[in-house]
Image (tube, rainbow, N blue to C red):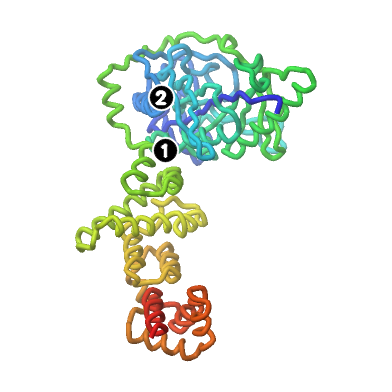
Amino acid sequence: MNYEPVIGLEVHVQLKTQSKMFCRSRNAEAAEPNLHICEVCTGQPGTLPVINREAVRKAVMVGLALNCEVAEYSKFDRKNYFYPDLPKGYQISQFDMPISGKGHLEVMVNGQARRVGITRAHLEEDAGKLMHPAGANFSLVDYNRAGTPLLEIVSDPDIKGSEDAKAYLQEIQNIVRYLGVSDADMEKGHLRCDANVSLRKTGETGLPNYKVEIKNMNSFKAVAAAIEHEIVRQAGVLDEGSRPVSETRGWLDDKGMTVSQRMKEESQDYRYFPEPDLPVLHFSREWLEEVKRSLPELPAQRKARLVEQLGMAPKDAATLVENKQLSDYLEDVMSELDAWMITEKVQEDAGTKAKYLKLAVTWALGQFSALLNEHKLGALETKVTPENFAELLKLIGMSKVSQLSAKDVFAKMFETGEDPSNLLESMGLAQVSDESLILDVVRKVIAANPKGVEDVKTKGERAFGFLVGQAMKELKGKGNPQMINEMLKKELGA
């Protein structure tokens, strides 16, 4: 390409608090419009805002997690603009003294680490929501969302393309979920993203002399697609010898294109001034240290621990930490297995632990994840307890059930939540490990398959699987494959 993109993202995270940012109205999903509203969040004359202490704390937690410089003093400002879903005619936001300043975030893109700078993270109140009934010549306003705490995280223009943007956005989603400050569901509007995209000639430095903001993207896929479309569109304008207009454009997901909405506002257009009804915030060093100590383990820290302490493959660890519920669940499963190995005095050497760790990861990322996706459930919402999951892994590890039969047992566990040992008996899937019975079957298979025996003698290990398969068939898939292998080799050797 003749051009390279210069991209910055504005990520809006809806904080999970009991009440809204400046009033006592509930901050919760509502079954009907205008249910969680009051005089303050609907902008009635004579009302005064009060700062939500928990929203401030959670905003600071995010700032610390993003390696930001948390300010000693911070204040709120009035941002003036006039939309039907903004009842006061202005938004209480932060301008020149945000809670969090410069920071950075490390993201992985195609196996490579990229650092994206953070410009700021400031706290504000959300607007309401406009609804446009089909075929009507009017719009309706739902103020349930008006006044909910919103943290806006503004990146530096360090993002080089759609893959970088997607990775950065997913990492922020993961971080705020690990912190417990937001559900960060893009489809529900808990996490929203605006992308500022412009192009410069390849090899140039400095910022382009225009900027296009893209709105209305409600999924990671939409963010990536909108950026890619806009890069192509702007390159076409530049190739014609023109300069793209600095404007705000909306993404039309069904058409796969952006459309012009309005000219791009600048800070002077909002006529910021300090919010006269709210005090300046002062964060003492002692309080900030207390908040820092309260931070939970973050995704990057968990990934490093899973790799370094448990010996998990980096790729598996990266996949797991992307899903906090599944990662938490697997840690509980491993805790159950550790307790069992200690209590039952099972040999707890590195090989045994590695065997069960690999088994747990394989099942968590395989069969378990497939059922979770099929039923649209989180790991902590299933009927399968970590204790029962660990019990099934023990049965597999001790060769009391085959991998194939274990899948049938697990499907029933997922449906009913029953104990795997009981299901193994009731479903008749217990693995056959009776030596005399397996020996009889092995001798029968050898006698009935002289060509298979001859193939083993001439072709070696490649032909051995046929005889094993015949033995498993005789035992209806319940035979202990290790015992079958050993007895076949012994009998053929004899």
- Asked whether the viewer can see residue 426, the reply is no
SS at mark 1 in the image: helix
Q: Which quarter of the figure is the C terminus placed in? A: bottom left
Q: In this view, does 444 lie to the left or right of 215?
A: left
SS at mark 2 in the image: loop
Residue 216 in picture, x, y percent from top left: 61, 32
Residue 230 in picture, x, y percent from top left: 68, 29
- Up the image or down, 429 lies above or below 191; here it is below
Determine which of the numbered discs, if any, sits on residue 125 in the image: none
Give the Cα distance between marks 1 and 2.
24 Å
Picture quadrant of residue 439: bottom left
Residue type of the residue flagged with mark 2:
Cys
As rendered, which of 353 and 274 lies closer to the eye?
Answer: 353
- Up the image or down, 194 lies above or below 317; here it is above
Task: Say which of marks 1 and 2 sits in front.
Answer: 1
| Mark closer to the chain start, 1 or 2 | 2
Contact between labelled residues 2 and 1, with CB atoms less than 8 Å apart = no
- Asked whether the viewer can see residue 104, the reply is yes
Q: Which quarter of the figure is the N terminus placed in? A: top right
Quickly name the residue at label 2: 23
As rendered, which of 441 and 86 lies closer to the eye?
Answer: 441
For label 1, the crowd category at 10 Å Cα-Cα, with few meaning under 14, some 14 to 19 and many 20 or more, is some
Residue 173 in picture, x, y percent from top left: 47, 36
Residue, x 52% and y 57% (percent of image)?
A: 374
Residue, x 26% and y 55% (percent of image)?
A: 338
Residue 34 in picture, x, y percent from top left: 51, 33
Residue, x 41% and y 56% (percent of image)?
A: 382
Determine which of the numbered discs, if any, sits on residue 177 in the image: 1
As rendered, which of 348 and 46 lies closer to the eye?
Answer: 348
For label 2, the crowd category at 10 Å Cα-Cα, with few meaning under 14, some 14 to 19 and many 20 or more, is many
Residue, x 41% and y 20% (percent of image)?
A: 100
